Image (tube, rainbow, N blue to C red):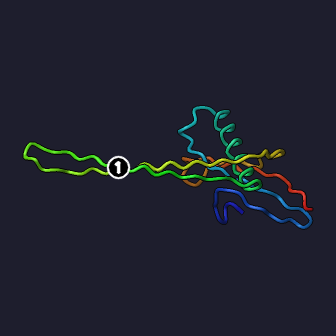
């Protein structure tokens, strides 16, 4: 499924009488010095994605715009505008039973893809 249409995030996959939650993470190999660190970061991110998907999240955004005027020697004024955007996401919940299905290098060899899964109970 991933090879046919690569994606990151969470999907629900149906298989006859079962539903599975699939959480896909892609990490830059160069950012993580060891395999254990890379694996742990992938696991935490997959759990976070799954928790947000199942339990929801609250997202807040703040934009700060800073304006500075600079005068040069000949009394010309230049205005410099700088904007900073801060986005915060809060999610509460716990996802247990998330298992690593597979991990592999993506096509360019610079990123590792991790695919986690968990069976969902149909109620």
Between 11 and 111, the one nearer to me in the picture:
11
How would you rate the neighbour count of disc 1 (Cα within 10 Å): few for under 14, some for 14-19, many for 20 or more? few
Q: Residue at x 83, y 44 (%)?
A: 96
- Please say if 3 is above or below 70: below
Give the quarter of the image for residue 6.
bottom right
Q: Which x, y percent locates residue 22?
A: 76, 56
Say which of 94 and 69 sits in front.
69
Identify the residue at horizontal 57%, vertical 32% (top origin).
33
* Left or right of 10 on screen, residue 123: right
Q: Look at the picture and state if 47 lies above or below 22.
A: above
| Number of marks in picture | 1
Relative horizontal placement of residue 35, taking residue 19 as reference (left or right)? left
Residue found at the far bottom of this picture: 16
What residue is shown with label 1?
A: 82
Give x and y (percent) for residue 52.
71, 52
Give the image location of residue 98, x and y in percent.
80, 46
Compared to residue 77, the image places residue 15 above or below, namely below
Place of residue 123 in the rendered image (x, y in percent of width and height, measured from the top left): 92, 62
Question: Where the N terminus falls, by quadrant?
Answer: bottom right
Q: Going by the image, does 41 lie left or right of 117?
A: left
Q: Residue at x 74, y 50 (%)?
A: 51
């Amino acid at each position: 499924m991933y090879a046919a249409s690569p994606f990151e995030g969470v999907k629900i996959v149906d298989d006859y009488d079962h539903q599975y939650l699939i959480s896909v993470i892609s990490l830059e190999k160069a950012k993580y010095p060891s395999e254990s660190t890379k694996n742990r970061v992938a696991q935490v991110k997959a759990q976070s994605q799954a928790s947000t998907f199942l339990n929801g999240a609250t997202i807040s955004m703040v934009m700060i715009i800073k304006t500075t005027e600079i005068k040069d020697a000949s009394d010309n004024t230049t205005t410099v505008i700088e904007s900073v955007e801060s986005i915060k996401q809060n999610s509460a919940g716990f996802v247990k039973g998330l298992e690593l299905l597979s991990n592999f290098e993506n096509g360019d060899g610079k990123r590792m893809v991790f695919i986690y899964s968990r069976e969902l109970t149909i109620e």
